[in-house]
């Protein structure tokens, strides 16, 4: 998922980063890496902090405005702004412009593509599975397989996607029986925390930089 997310960021970095006179050319790659890390890390942090429902709601968004009204998206945007100013020394006004253009585009495209049955570059199973350790912490094949049962084997085909995933676990809207959405979010929380511990001090950024150096 991270490599595909990095490709998505690069797709929209030309206009917003590379051709931005406020971003020094030697920092283009670092800004791209920070944007990728902000989105992936923000989603992982939300899952680790028990905000699985908020992540679900984000992926049900129908418009860019709805996407950016999500507290998860707002935290991602704020984290990106803080990092490129404090770590990279990007001018505050330039950073605000980047955060208000690049991040909404990336998250909106991620949400749209993960719910598009004709686009296999992202699916909600692989996104959440990669951020929660996939095969760990849930038993019987892990979180990845747990999600896969409700996303057509891990894909986003067949009209499934996040809405269908939630419906299956909540009995069409309620959380009765089988643990429901509360149990699912609990598994995501535990898996995300464990994944963060395993990633160590460099976290997702080390993985992202590895992809960039290929």
Image (cartoon, rainbow, N blue to C red):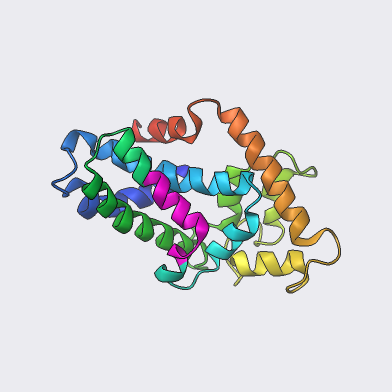
Q: Which residues are magenta?
A: 67-80
Residue 68 colored magenta? Answer: yes
Query: In percent of the image, x 41 and y 30: which residue is there?
Result: 210
Residue 175 screen position, x and y as percent: 79, 66
Q: Which quadrant would residue 183 be assigned to in this image?
A: bottom right
Q: Residue at the top extreme?
A: 201
Query: In percent of the image, x 54 and y 63: which residue is there?
Result: 59
Residue 46 as seen in the image, left or right of residue 73: right
Residue 101 screen position, x and y as percent: 30, 58
Query: In percent of the image, x 13 and y 46: which residue is there?
Result: 21
Q: Does residue 94 sit above or below 88 in this rendering? A: below
Query: In percent of the image, x 44 and y 34: which residue is there?
Result: 205
Residue 133 appears in the figure: no
Residue 195 screen position, x and y as percent: 62, 35
Q: Does residue 161 sit above or below 199 in this rendering? A: below
Question: For this rendering, which residue is in front, 84 or 14?
Answer: 84
Residue 98 colored magenta? Answer: no
Residue 174 as seen in the image, left or right of residue 17: right
Q: Main secondary structure of the magenta part?
A: helix
Residue 61 screen position, x and y as percent: 51, 69
Residue 139 appears in the figure: yes
Location of the C terminus by quadrant is top left
Question: For this rendering, which residue is in front, 199 or 7?
Answer: 199
């Amino acid at each position: 998922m991270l490599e595909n997310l990095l490709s998505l960021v690069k797709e929209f970095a030309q206009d917003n980063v590379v051709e931005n006179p406020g971003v020094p050319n030697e920092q283009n790659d670092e800004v791209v890496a920070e944007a990728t890390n902000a989105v992936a890390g923000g989603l992982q942090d939300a899952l680790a902090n028990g905000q699985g429902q908020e992540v679900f709601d984000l992926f049900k968004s129908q418009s860019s405005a709805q996407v950016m009204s999500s507290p998860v998206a707002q935290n991602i945007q704020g984290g990106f702004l803080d990092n490129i100013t404090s770590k990279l020394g990007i001018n505050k006004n330039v950073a605000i412009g980047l955060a208000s253009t690049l991040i909404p585009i990336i998250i909106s495209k991620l949400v749209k593509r993960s719910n598009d049955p004709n686009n296999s570059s992202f699916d909600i199973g692989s996104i959440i599975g990669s951020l929660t350790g996939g095969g760990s912490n849930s038993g019987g094949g892990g979180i990845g397989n747990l999600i896969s049962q409700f996303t057509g084997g891990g894909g986003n085909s067949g009209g499934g996607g996040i809405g269908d995933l939630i419906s299956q676990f909540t009995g069409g809207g309620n959380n009765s029986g089988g643990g429901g959405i509360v149990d699912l979010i609990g598994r995501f929380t535990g898996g995300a925390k464990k994944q963060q511990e395993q990633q160590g001090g460099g976290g997702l950024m080390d993985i992202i930089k590895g992809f960039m150096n290929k």
